[in-house]
Amino acid sequence: MSTSLPRRILGRTGLEVSIVCAGCAPLGDMPETFGYSVPEEQALATLRAIFRSPITFLDTAAAYGDGESERRIGLVLRELGGLPPGYVLATKADRDLATGRFDAWQVRRSVERSLKLLGLQKLQLVYFHDPEHAGLTVSEALAPEGPVRMLLALRDAGLIEHVGVAAGPIDMLLAYIETGLFEVVITHNRYTLLNRTAEPLIQRANELGVAVVNAAPYGSGLLAKGPAAYPRYAYRQAHPEELERARQLEEICARHGVPLAAAALQFSLRDPRITATIVGMSRPERVEETLRLATWPIPDSLWEELATVPPLPYDPQTGQLVSTT
């Protein structure tokens, strides 16, 4: 592919990454989350297309398909003879999906399984992932014998190079990054054309020197396919006010001859506080389409008009009002 992508340094990690990160959650075949299935051959073809593209940053997790995403990535890495030079592959340490257990033992088990499935000797970047789904408080996660300490111990042992945190609730993520233990933070579905509730996190992370990776700029699909074709936001049925504002955004983009998906993606890409933006990819043609949307010419007048549609002030998963000041 001839399209090129800018690269940025991922905060204190020193890793150089493309500003678009290939999200590999759909490749774990998770129809209950995304509403569609991804057969193995389709997933492998998508991964091969990613490795032929200028996208040099890939994101997965132990929980995606309970290891299936990592297993499929591992198959392609073996074809390539390992992770090619210049690429960064991030994964996440997860709770036991069957029992909900997320203690130190589970973190070790999760990381060791990731290494095995991916066929790697070392992981470049591992996030502590979705502790809220295990009912863990921040203090429990950070306890001396707790899961975060195990993640740091695995880093000190050389199995992991860098450690990050990825979760939903913004107040929880703020508490984690204030510890100074994490080099990267992922927020998802909370910094889009429709929702800016991650604003305090992004600002604080920049002050602390923590790299920000923004996931789900399309709100899991609503802002990519449009409200009529895909009326879902944050992996659930979209609320009426989300659909109404998405329609307004879509109409504004149409008047300017710009796809809604291009504006949604570039809203994240153009923010200098965000190092990379994760875009889920489920089929090979999505790779080239994403590159086209990332480089679509967008006039300043469109951004000015889009700014007249106010973002929704509540957390997209809990529905709670969130202050962005």
Image (cartoon, helix red, strand yellow):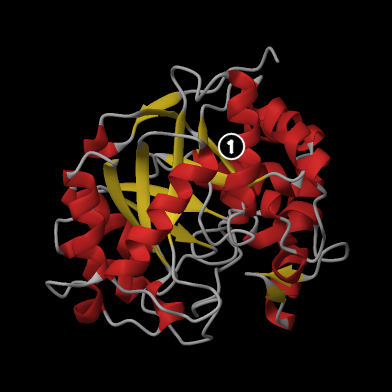
Seen in the image, is 318 located left or right of residue 32?
left
- Residue at image coords 82%, 61%: 36
Whether residue 284 appears in this view of the structure is: yes
Seen in the image, is 179 located left or right of residue 246?
left
Q: Secondary structure at mark 1?
A: helix
What x and y, as percent, mark residue 273? 35, 44
- Residue at image coords 71%, 57%: 223
Question: How many numbered marks have been drawn onto this rendered protein structure?
Answer: 1
Q: Looking at the picture, does residue 202 appear above or below residue 140? A: above
Nearer to us in this view, 7 or 246: 7
What x and y, as percent, mark residue 199? 37, 62
- Residue at image coords 67%, 70%: 235
Nearer to us in this view, 86 or 78: 78
The quarter of the picture where the N terminus appears is top right
Write down the quadrant of residue 308 in the picture: bottom right
Whether residue 295 appears in this view of the structure is: no
Q: Residues within 10 Å of mark 1 (few under 14, many from 20)?
A: many
Q: Looking at the picture, does residue 147 appear above or below residue 10? A: below
Nearer to us in this view, 63 or 105: 105
Q: Which residue is mark 1?
A: 74
